[in-house]
């Protein structure tokens, strides 16, 4: 009788442990979701930035990538800090946000000014951004100051076309692979060109074919885990003489046909989740 009971006892204990772990995984995920909601609604975000949530879907995008509050996350080229505003509060207590941007010695005046403006913004709100670590994206190679296998997640928002234009697409993705831990996530959002178009041509106007991004990422040691239409916009015709920047928020044509472009909204975007093999 005792021998017959042992498997049942083992299975009961296993079931209890599995149930406990499952509940904790769900609880941790829910806690991160709450933090994302709080960050998105936070008073540190401007009304102008919040107005873009309907186009950028920050909560849905970050949850699709699998963001967790305990992660080491690397944000690439933050621009004015639109996504930093959301990532920093979520990771502030248990994780770490590293931002790889430009520097005071960057090649162009635009890059230098962009870096100074971003840094000043972070310094203006130390209660929100005190834990954010700043590093240089490119200099002597990409992400040279960031240790290999140190990041749980790397995120890039609307920057891929720049690396294609610079002829450094492969180098950038190789660097992302190097700094990620095995099994780590690369999350990419990018203005999406029509399939069958040439990436070098479309990148001049800010758009890139989705299949091209996938091909390059896979050649650099990533596996496409999933893709989403969270940030799709079928209204985007992608045929503007002055590129994607014709659409909001850029409005490169200024007041010319502004109502038309406002009605279209922001660009059609791919949203891709890769895993480091």
Image: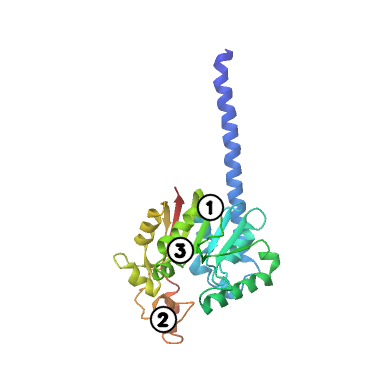
Residue 131 placement (x, y as % from top left): 66, 61
Q: SS at mark 3? A: strand
Disc number placed over residue 189 in the picture, else none: 3
In the image as oriented, which residue stretches furthest toward the top? 1
Q: What residue is disc 1 on? A: 148
Disc 3 crowd, CA 10 A, few/some/many (<14, 14-19, 20+):
many
Whether the residues at callouts 1 and 3 have beta carbons within 8 Å, the answer is no
Residue 3 placement (x, y as % from top left): 56, 14
User: Which is more toward the observer, 133 or 140?
Assistant: 140
User: Which is more toward the observer, 90 or 144?
Assistant: 144
Residue 33 placement (x, y as % from top left): 59, 55
Mark 1 → mark 3, Cα distance in angstroms: 23 Å
Task: Tell me which numbered mark, 1 or 3, is placed earlier along the sequence.
Answer: 1
Which-is-in-front pick, marks 2 and 1? 1
Q: Is any atom of residue 230 visible in this view?
A: no
Q: Locate residue 132: give its quadrant.
A: bottom right
Identify the residue at horizontal 58%, vertical 46% (top origin).
26
Identify the residue at horizontal 41%, vertical 54% (top origin).
220
């Amino acid at each position: 009788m005792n021998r017959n009971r042992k498997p049942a006892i083992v299975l009961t204990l296993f079931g209890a442990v599995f149930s406990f772990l499952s509940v904790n995984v769900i609880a941790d995920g829910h806690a991160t979701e709450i933090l994302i909601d709080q960050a998105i609604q936070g008073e540190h975000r401007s009304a102008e930035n919040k107005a873009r949530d309907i186009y950028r879907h920050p909560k849905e995008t970050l949850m699709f990538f699998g963001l967790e509050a305990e992660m080491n996350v690397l944000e690439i080229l933050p621009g004015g800090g639109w996504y930093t505003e959301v990532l920093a509060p979520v990771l502030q207590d248990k994780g770490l946000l590293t931002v790889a941007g430009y520097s005071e010695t960057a090649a162009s005046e635009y890059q230098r000014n962009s870096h100074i403006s971003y840094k000043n913004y972070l310094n203006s709100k130390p209660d929100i951004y005190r834990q954010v670590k700043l590093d240089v994206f490119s200099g002597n190679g990409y992400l040279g100051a960031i240790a290999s296998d140190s990041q749980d997640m790397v995120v890039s928002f609307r920057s891929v076309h720049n690396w294609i234009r610079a002829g450094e697409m492969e180098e950038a993705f190789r660097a992302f692979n190097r700094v990620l831990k095995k099994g780590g996530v690369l999350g990419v959002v990018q203005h999406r060109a029509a399939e069958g178009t040439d990436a070098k041509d479309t990148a001049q106007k800010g758009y890139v074919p989705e299949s091209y991004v996938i091909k390059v990422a896979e050649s650099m040691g990533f596996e496409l885990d999933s893709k989403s239409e969270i940030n799709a916009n079928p209204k985007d015709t992608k045929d503007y003489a002055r590129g994607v920047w014709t659409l909001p928020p850029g409005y490169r044509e200024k007041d010319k046909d502004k109502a038309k472009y406002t009605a279209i909204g922001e660009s059609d975007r791919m949203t891709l989740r890769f895993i480091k093999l």
